Amino acid sequence: MDIIQFTTQPKRVNPKSGDGMDPVLSKWGNNLVTKFHVLMRISQIYDSKNVAIQQFVQECLEAINTLVQREGPLSLKVIRNDFFLNGQRLRYSVEGFTSFKYLLTQWKKKLIGEVIFNSLVDEGMLKHFIYTLMELEEGRQENANLFNEALARNRILTIVVNPLEIVEGEEESFTFQKEDQREVGKKVFFETIGTIKEVITQIKGRQRADIRKLKRLAQKAVHLVIEDESILLGMTTIKNYDEYTFNHSVNVSIYSLAMGKRLGFSKKTLTELGITALFHDIGKSKIPIDVLNKPASLSDDEWGMMKKHPLMGVEIVLNLKQLGEINPRMVIGIFDHHLKNDFSGYPKLFRKKEISLFGRIIQIVDSYDAMTTPRIYKKVPYTPEQALAIMLKERTVHFDPILLKIFIGLVGIYPIGSLVLLNTHEMGIVYKPSHDPRWLDRPIVLLVDRGKEGEAKKEVVDLTETDGMGRYKRSIVKTLDPFKYHIDIAKYFL
């Protein structure tokens, strides 16, 4: 048959950040990516006539047709490392990370950049679409044309496929020597958040918690931190408001591991520290959610309940049989992490004791991550620089001053994720501290556009670089508040 020439074109819209996206559209868009992922995976196991695939086809159909009915013609498009739904960037959740990563990787390998559903689709159309997609050869330039021809032969005119658009310079992306390690870091980070969430949910439901996976992930994190601590430190810029408890626990674990590395801990001790940090707030699983998420000040009774969480955490960890032999410093670290350097914290002690090293480390990193993360009662958090300034003021009262100095050396005077203005009038995001401790004020910076969306310029600069006259090419003038510039810092580390 003659090949049908398509004239249907996607509606051209300027991509917008997902920050202002309709929450309902965002929810259904994420659901669509998840259903696509599942269906693509299942299609590799069963053929199109197998009854086992039926349920997954129906779930994916519902996701597509709900959006088509709501939005009209529907475009799902890859731009760089993001998916855009009708021009609006989808922000994936912790649970959705695997689906986004799989879909993005598969589409890019097959050079498919956009799929447009111009109207409602039925079961036969969707099956043919999925199996045709999965049969495409990787790296073949004409894949989009071949795809459209295959659809046309089956009289499927409502679905249009467009090729992947390579943005100039994108093929090189960021030139890091350890790109694979960064991908491993992302996987470990998101898997650990998902696993700590599962464990806490199991504990709340009085079920047997699967701790073995969490231990394996902690060991992987130790390996990554020993190899290159900046990989996981960059991930701590991700501040998931909806998943605060789990996201925060993983961030605290990463900071603690980096501190332990600086202190010369063995791999075994680092693993114990990492697990202790993951569990430092596990006692909060016994506190009612309305108290944890209360936007107003806590009552005396509620605050009294909150102060018990370190002790409740110790009780929970001692009962985790799958954790195996527990080193006493792990439970002591959980107990100590709110005591404060002058013992003005909690729980109240009948007799003063030396605060454990694990407890003093976690106390510092717990405070820092909490201050730099949006909360229900503080939607705009402190910038990294503001948080460090507050902590320095309280260094003798609340924190171990020597450990705080080590922590500042770790994150730098301008911590990873800080938005900075340079003397060249360029804006940048602190990507890595300088390798030389003499230049804490001269980190490695990723330049970003000064426009509304703050897109990356794909240029990483080292502020220790000098010109022929021995003068620094660039210097930091001041830090900026990313919230004021509508810049999502986390996306530059994904």
Image (cartoon, rainbow, N blue to C red):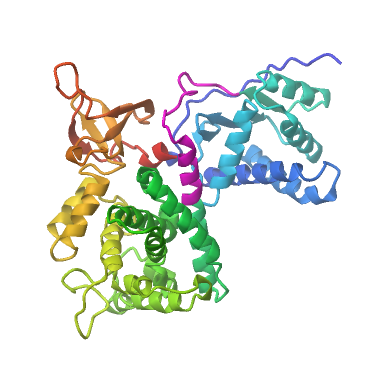
| Residue at x 44% of width, y 36% of height | 178
Q: Which residue: 34% across, 30% down?
A: 452
Q: Residue furthest bottom?
A: 350
In the visual, does 151 lie left or right of 1? left
- Residue drawn where x is 19% and y is 37% of the image: 439
Residue 279 appears in the rendering: yes
Query: In this view of the protein, which residue sits in the foreground, 227 or 452?
Result: 227
| Residue 126 located within the stretch drawn in magenta | no
Residue 304 relative to residue 400: left or right? right
Quadrant where the image shows the C terminus:
top left
Q: Is residue 188 magenta?
A: yes
Q: Estimate the x, y position of residue 343 in percent, counting from the top left.
A: 19, 74
- Choose top left, top right, bottom left or bottom right for residue 255: bottom left
Quadrant of the rendered structure where residue 281 is? Answer: bottom left
Q: Which range is magenta?
A: 164-189
Vertical comparison of 177 with 33: above or below:
above
Q: In what quadrant of the picture does the N terminus appear?
A: top right
Side of 447 where 322 appears, left or right: right
Front-lying residue, 42 or 264: 264
Residue 71 in sight from this viewpoint = no
Q: Residue at horizontal 40%, vertical 43%?
A: 231
Query: Is 470 left or right of 458, judged from the image as shown?
Result: left
Q: Give how far across and how far down residue 270 sits, in percent.
A: 38, 59
Whether 480 is drawn above or below 327: the answer is above
Give coordinates of residue 332: x percent, y percent.
33, 74
Q: Is residue 11 above or below residue 188?
A: above
Report how many numbered discs are placed on residues in the image. 0
Q: Nearer the viewer, residue 480 or 102?
A: 102
